[in-house]
Amino acid sequence: MKRRDLLKGLILAPVADLSPVLGVEAAASSHAGASAQPGVRPSTAGMRSQIAGMSLEALREQYRSDLFDDYLPFWERTGFDFELGGFMCAVDHDGTQVNTDKHMWYQGRGMWTHAFAYNHFGGEIHLEMARKTRDFILRHGMDGEGHWVRTLDREGGQIGAADRMGYTALFIAEGLQEYARAAGDEESMELAIESFWKGARLYDDPERDVGQGYLPVSYPGMRIQGFEMVTIVLLTQLLQKREDPKLEARLAHAVKVVMERFWNPEYRLNNEALNHDYERPDDDNEDYIYLGHAIETFWMILHEALRRGDRALFDLAAERMKRHMEVAWDDVYGGFFRAMEVHGSFTFDKVLWLQEEVLIGMMILLEHTDLEWPERWFGRTFRYVQEKYPLKPHGYPMWIMGGDRKVTFRPRTSRKGNYHHPRHLMLNLLALDRMIARGGGVSDVWQ
């Protein structure tokens, strides 16, 4: 008898320049003809003069300050190696460098952040930071077999084995494709595509046996929603810059498996792990929902649906994002839980990145629909984040990256993020600029 059948009755009750996306010619829709989902049909809300109780201009100023007065100056002062290139993210609240290791995920992510900042807001220092990171990892980041390693020391010495899961290759590719636009560097775009396929080959290997510590069970060749997620956000951006039928097919595959195979119709939630053939396992992974990755993935699918001009996919992703948010919200202390076992308990920590993925998703819906529910969720989440995460009340710049259920301040830390937080600030600032330029009107993308 299947494990989930034994537990019946205990189931949880229901409870990027990405602006050019609006000008991309619609691709063929894999969901053509599908009906809009409940809760996603347009409301009569009309023009938006306020969000989260603030005028659009006041909200934009908050985002501008958080990005330009807090985040970007911090990384210009500490954490970046202007001499040798690369990000050293082991930094304490006061800017003290805890160690000088350069984790390769953070090199790709930081390269993307500063190339994107340069592409949309200017600033030669951001192009310099992206370029020096690119040059550093291309000199030192691969082992003798051509695989990206996981970590480098400050001088470029390799620490530990190569990444055999493929994530590093995807984060490097995301950084390179954004840098390619910033620098007008066609070689970097070719390297980005090569790096993506290198990671995809690792992921597609049925013998790949790389433990995933956050999952209940790991086994060879397992499929991970998180990998499909990074594929989607990378290729949605890259394909706005370069036509490539093979990459289009791979992106369509990633969207399809997230919407159809990782989706668990019994729970109405997405599983995080499947067998290599995308079948749902009969083990503890069947019970495990990584709410954070699901929410993050669905806003990325919203952007992909905009790129395709696929309203049915957009509506379905919006409704499923809403479902995961409703399940993840902490009605006692506020904020979103990161993960859960459907027949067990929540993972009670509160990470900043998850709260900000919600804010990105809600801003997309606020910009492109006149739905009312995204404004309620945005307001609730924005107020929670602004209350709990900024370090300014404790005398420091930047924000708390994560904490316990109450987001209790801890006086020491050993990591500062260079990706999720600035991505949220930049994407939503750009969205607010567009909304203000339209006088608060909803975009005409679906007209």
Image: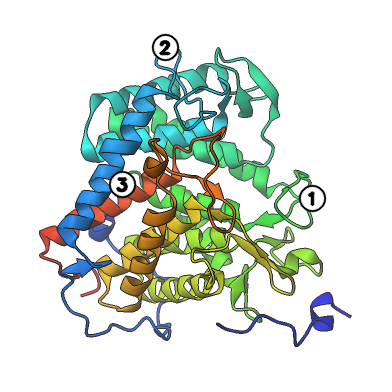
Image coloring type: rainbow
Q: Earlier in the sequence, mark 3 or mark 1?
A: 1
What residue is rendered at 20% in x and 50% in y?
61
Say which quadrant the C terminus sits in: bottom left
Residue beneath label 3, please?
Answer: 426
Res 186 quadrant in image: top left
Q: What is the crowding at mark 1: few (fewer than 14 residues within 10 Å), some, or many (at least 20)?
A: some
The secondary structure type at the circle numbered 1 is: loop
What residue is rendered at 35% in x and 77% in y?
373
- Which one is in front in this view, the residue at disc 3 or the one at disc 1? 3
Q: Point out residue 142 in the picture as x, y percentages from the top left corner.
A: 60, 23
What label does residue 83 carry, if any?
Answer: 2
Real-space Cα distance between discs 2 and 1? Answer: 41 Å
Residue beneath label 1, please?
Answer: 220
User: The residue under label 2 is which amino acid type?
Assistant: Glu
Q: Is residue 369 left or right of residue 235?
A: left
